[in-house]
Image: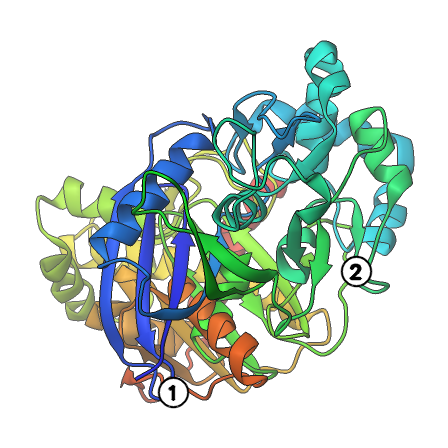
Amino acid sequence: MTLVAGVDSSTQSCKVVIRDLDTGAIVRAGRASHPDGTSVHPDHWWDALVTAIADAGGLADVAAISIGGQQHGMVALDSEGRVVRDALLWNDTRSAGAAADLISEFGADALAARTGLVPVASFTSTKLRWLRDNEPENAERVAAVALPHDWLTWRLRGFGPVESAPLGPVLDELTTDRSDVSGTGYWNPATGQYDRDLLVAALGHDAITPRVLGPGEPAGTGIVDTASVDAAMLTDVVVGPGAGDNAAAGLGLGAVPGDIVVSLGTSGTVFAVTEKTSEDPTGIVAGFASASGEFLPLVCTLNAARVLDAFARVLGVDHDELGRLALAAAPGAGGAVLVPYFEGERTPNLPDATATLFGLTLLSTTRENLARAAVEGMLCALADGVEAILAQGVEAKRLLLVGGAAQNPAVQAIAAQVFGVPVQIPTPGEYVAAGAAAQAAWVITGARPAWPVEVVASPEVDHKPAILERYRRAAGTYAA
C-alpha cells in the first residue's frame, strides 16, 4: 500500500490525514491546536504541524505530502529567513484603511483587471501596506513575503533560519501555488505572473516571492524528520505544491466546472470551479484560482452556522431540536424574515450592520417560525453569494452543501427550497486535508486522483422563489 499525506493548517488547528493512494481511504489522522488571535507567530503553526504528524503516526511510510492552509496570512521574512513579526491573519482587520488607500491609488476596476480582486482587509497586499505605514522599520527588513502554507512547506523541506533548519535560509526555495497566491492582491491569475508594481506599492520595495507551482508540480523531494532531534532528511518523501484552504476543499470534494460549493462554517463561503477568470470591480466576487488548474470565483459572508447557534441559544434548544422546530413551520416562516447580519456583513459590504427580524405579528411569533426564519435567513444570505457567482457567467449544475450545519435535516430540506440548483450533501470530512492529500497523490502519479466522495443526502428540488424574494425585500432596507 502506498500512502500519501494531506495537511490542513487552518486558523484554529492543524489536521493531518494519511490516505491510501489507490482508493483514497483514510488510514490514520492526527491534529493539534493553534493559538487564538488574529496575529500569530508562524512558529506556532510549525509546532502544531510536528505534533499533528506525530499524532497521525508519523511519515516514515508516506510517499508524498502536501499542505493546505489558511489564505492571505502575511509571513514576512528577513534575509536570514527569520520571521520579521507575527503574521497578520486573514481575519485581522487593522488593514482596512490600507485597502481603501490601494483602491484610491489604483482604482477598483484596474485592480480587478490586474489581480481578480478588489482589496479588503483580508488580503495580503493590504497587510503589507499596513506594515509599511505603521511599522516602517519592520517593513524595511522584509526580504521575502510568503503565505502560511508556503512557509510551512519551506520549513518542512528543511529551510529556515540556520539555528533551526538544516538547509538554511534559502529564500529562493520558497514555493506557493496558483490558488493561494491568487489571494495576495499582487498576482494576476490571467497571466500567471506577479504584479511587481502592486507589491512595491504595498510594501514600499520589491521582495522575493515564492515560485508558483502548477497543480501536479512538486515543490521538491526530501523533508525534515519531525520525529528526530537531529532533523535528518527523509529524501524519499515528495512534497506537493500545497493550496489555499478553499481551493484544497474544492479539490478534496472533487469539484469540477458546473459545481458550486456552499460551506456553512462560522462564516459562509460560496465558490465555483470555472474555466475562465473573474473580474468583479464591486469586490463581491474574488477571482481566485483553483488547485486543479482552473479558476475559483469566491464569495465570503460573515454569518453562517453561528446564526443557528444564536437562535438555538435563544430558544433554549440544541441544533437537532432547532431543526425539528423549523420543519414544523411552513415555508416562509409565517412572514417572519431574518436578515442575519449579526457581526456586520462582508457580502454585501455592511461592516456596521446588525441582524434584524422583519414581519413579526402576534400570530407569526412562534418558536417554530423563529427557528425556520433562522435557517431561511442563513441560507438566503448565501443564496445572494450564489447569485453573485452566477452573474460572472458561471453555469451551475449542482450545489455541494458542506460544513457541520449541512448535516441538519432542516437545513438540507430548506436549502432545496432556497437554491434553484440541485443540492447534494457530501459525507462530513476534512476536505481541505483531503484536497492536499490529492495533490500529494497527483505529484507522484502525474494525474489527479479520482477518489470517491460519498453523498449522504440529495434532497428533492423543491424551489420556492418566494422565500428569497421576501428576504431580498427585507435585506434591501439596509441599502435604503
Residue linked to disc 1:
461
- Residue type, label 1: Val
Nearest the viewer among 260 and 348 is: 260
Relative height, residue 336 to residue 453 (above, below) = above
Residue linked to disc 2:
279
- Contact, CB < 8 Å: mark 1 with mark 2? no
Q: Residue at x 36, y 69 (%)?
A: 62
Q: Pick whichever of labels 1 and 2 is earlier in the sequence.
A: 2
Expressed as whole percent of the image width and height from the top left, the position of residue 149 reads: 53, 49
Label 1 – label 2 distance at C-alpha: 31 Å
Q: Secondary structure at mark 2?
A: loop
Label 2 crowd (10 A; few <14 / some 14-19 / many >=20): many
Q: Residue at x 76, y 29 (%)?
A: 100
Expressed as whole percent of the image width and height from the top left, the position of residue 139 reads: 73, 19
Nearest the viewer among 130 and 344 is: 130
Q: Secondary structure at mark 1?
A: loop
Expressed as whole percent of the image width and height from the top left, the position of residue 119 reads: 72, 40
Q: Quadrant of residue 262?
A: bottom left
